[in-house]
Image (cartoon, rainbow, N blue to C red):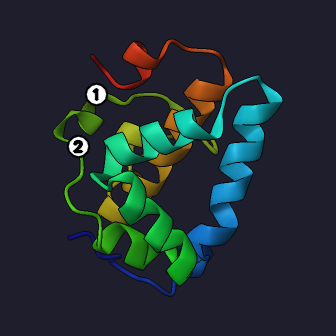
Amino acid sequence: MLTAKSESTHRIYAMKFAEIYPLYVAKAERKQRTQAEVDQVICWLTGYDQAGLQQQIVQEHDMATFFAQAPVLNPNRAQIKGVVCGVRVEAIDDPLMQAIRYMDKLVDELAKGKAMAKILRQ
């Protein structure tokens, strides 16, 4: 379970996953990727199955709750490297912020046309 060190510090923790999810899908679709591929990378990272992911969207949980309720974060997430919002994801100390940025990075890689096997670190 991930919790924020200081939930009042970052606005993103209180943002609803249901509001961010369509932005991920739109970003991917602009680059000829699909909602199913977005779901696949999010499920890979968080351990949600498709039904669990949809339930999180319907229940409109905030990002902190979305990650706190994630079944199991993929152990290969540590292989995700790079920069999101000007910050190296591997250098983020706050586990919740790091998980959020990992998800951002996966969607970025998807939108940039990277092969799914590479995105999922296979």
Considering the numbered disc 2 on the image, is that residue within a helix, a strand or a loop?
loop
Q: Dot 1, crowdedness within 10 Å: few (<14), some or many (≥20)?
A: few
Residue holding disc 2: 74
- Marks 1 and 2 sit apart, C-alpha to C-alpha, by 10 Å
Dot 2 crowding, Cα within 10 Å, few <14, some 14–19, many 20+: few
Where does the image place residue 4, in percent across and percent down from the top left?
35, 76
The residue lying furthest to the right in this view is 30
Res. 94 in view:
no
Disc nearer the start of the sequence (1/2) = 2
Under mark 1, the amino acid is: Gln
Count the marks: 2
- Return the residue found at the far bottom: 8
In the depicted structure, whether residue 53 falls above or below residue 62: above
Which quadrant, please, contains the C terminus?
top left
Q: Residue 36 occupies which quadrant of the picture?
A: top right
Q: Mark 2 belongs to which amino acid?
A: Asn
Q: Is residue 12 left or right of residue 46?
A: right
Q: Quadrant of the N terminus?
A: bottom left
Residue 30 placement, left or right of 57: right
Percent position of residue 64, x then y: 42, 76
Which labelled disc corresponds to residue 79? 1
Q: Nearer the viewer, mark 1 or mark 2?
A: 2
